Image (cartoon, rainbow, N blue to C red):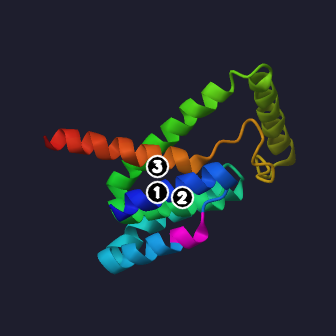
Amino acid sequence: MFLTAGLCFCAWTDQKWSRVSNEALMLLAFVGVMEWGMGFITGALPFLLFGMLLFRFRVMGAGDGKLMAVIGGYLGIQSGFYAVALGFLAGAVWSLWRLRQPGLAAERFCYLQEYVRAVMQGRCLQPYDSLEHADAPHHIPFAVCLAVGVCIYGVVRWMKAL
């Protein structure tokens, strides 16, 4: 229940201010460690590493990576994987929906093509996008997608238990 409330708050802050609250993440992690002990940390660590890798290339924000770690800590590695994967799926659907804006899909595919060309020619990886302009039409509040993924996973798990 605490995870759900925290996810809703983090999704709200990401939607409203384009930032996931570090204070909320720290509180969620603290409660998770107090409740689950080392199990929380072992569940969170793979998600944190993956999230920070994605942040390194500016595919998503650091708060989103930390939120993935909290989800993995509460749900464990396997359940966390399914919940986060559903969140990525929700994000993909939302992103595709936003690409319907006139010219945005062509702009983003041209940007991707130039990025791949620059990486191939320069032989070095560089950040894919700048996270400075959170109001850009191709940015989505990913914490909302992660919260949706956890909710879908919870509903599916609850329905299987019936």
Q: Amino acid at mark 3?
A: Ala
Q: Earlier in the sequence, mark 1 or mark 3?
A: 1
Identify the residue under disc 1.
7
19 above or below 106? below
Mark 2 crowd level (few <14, some 14–19, many ≥20, 10 Å Cα): many
Q: Residue at x 78, y 38 (%)?
A: 116
Q: Earlier in the sequence, mark 2 or mark 3?
A: 2
Give 29 or 135, whichever is nearer the viewer.
135
Residue 142 coordinates in the image, percent (x, y): 59, 47
Give 25 or 81, whichever is nearer the viewer.
25
* Secondary structure of residue under mark 3: helix
Q: Are marks 2 and 3 in contact (CB under 8 Å)?
A: yes
* Secondary structure of residue under mark 1: helix
Q: Are marks 1 and 3 in contact (CB under 8 Å)?
A: yes
* Residue 23 highlighted magenta (yes or no): yes
Identify the residue under disc 3.
147
Q: Residue at x 49, y 48 (%)?
A: 146
